[in-house]
Amino acid sequence: AIHLDHGSYEMAKEAMAAGFTSIMFDGSDLPIAENILKTKELVSWAHGRGIAIEAEVGSIGGEEDGIVGAGEIASIDEAKAMTAVGVDYLAAGIGNIHGQYPANWTGLKLAHLQALGAAIDEVCGRPMPIVLHGGSGVPDEQIQEAITYGVAKVNVNTEAQLAFHQAVRDFVLSDEDLVGKNYDPRKFLKPGVDAIQAAVEERIAVFGSAGKVN
């Protein structure tokens, strides 16, 4: 699987033409009517090619791939309208943000997620997978509760980046980079790569996704 994350309308079309198997069109910075219209067009094109498509309502706080969101909570009515155009996954703003969470963050709006999930499931007649962006730093118990309300994909990146940075920093500060041929990029970066693997394996365990293929 090759996934495009937070793609614009044109990026989504280019990625589909290039052979991507999964597309996220992020029209959250557009008026909702335009977001829905463009998503509908992309759904038609994607499904004709066997490609899964994800859309977003509300917005995810922080900055990701040039799109800045203030963390707006997704409207249930807008989520229902977006679901109705036939998306395969729905990303919804529920208090989540990209990057590191500030000290005064108040947590995911789980009651809103529960209501939103029930509403969109009714629209499509089946459980609609919800995507939780900004999963890094969310307390494990909140993510696990969110999964019970329909979250089927959790995006994490910052945790892996921080693990990589700390491992490489420790490697350099301990002067291990000066030993033998540890200047070789493959050896120099190995602690960081190992740290990413460990961080991802730990997240897989928390999410309960080990051994699942879809």
Image: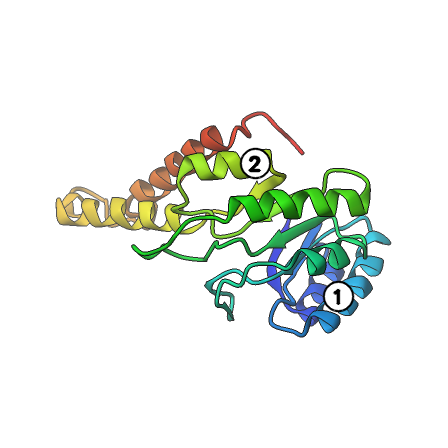
| Residue shown at 32% from the left, 56% from the top | 104
Residue 1 visible, this angle: no
Q: Quadrant of the N terminus?
A: top right
Q: Amino acid at mark 2?
A: Ile
Q: Amino acid at mark 1?
A: Ile
Which residue lies under the disc numbered 2?
Answer: 147
| Residue shown at 16% from the left, 43% from the top | 176
Crowding at mark 1 (Cα within 10 Å: few <14, some 14-19, many 20+): many
Q: Position of residue 66 (x, y in %)?
A: 51, 71
Up the image or down, 192 lies above or below 86; here it is above
Q: Earlier in the sequence, mark 2 or mark 1?
A: 1
Q: Position of residue 148 (x, y in %)?
A: 58, 33
Residue contact at pointers 2 and 1, CB within 8 angstroms: no
Q: Position of residue 116 (x, y in %)?
A: 65, 48
Using the numbered discs, state the Cα–Cα distance from disc 2 to disc 1 in whole angstroms: 25 Å
Residue 36's label in the rendered image is 1
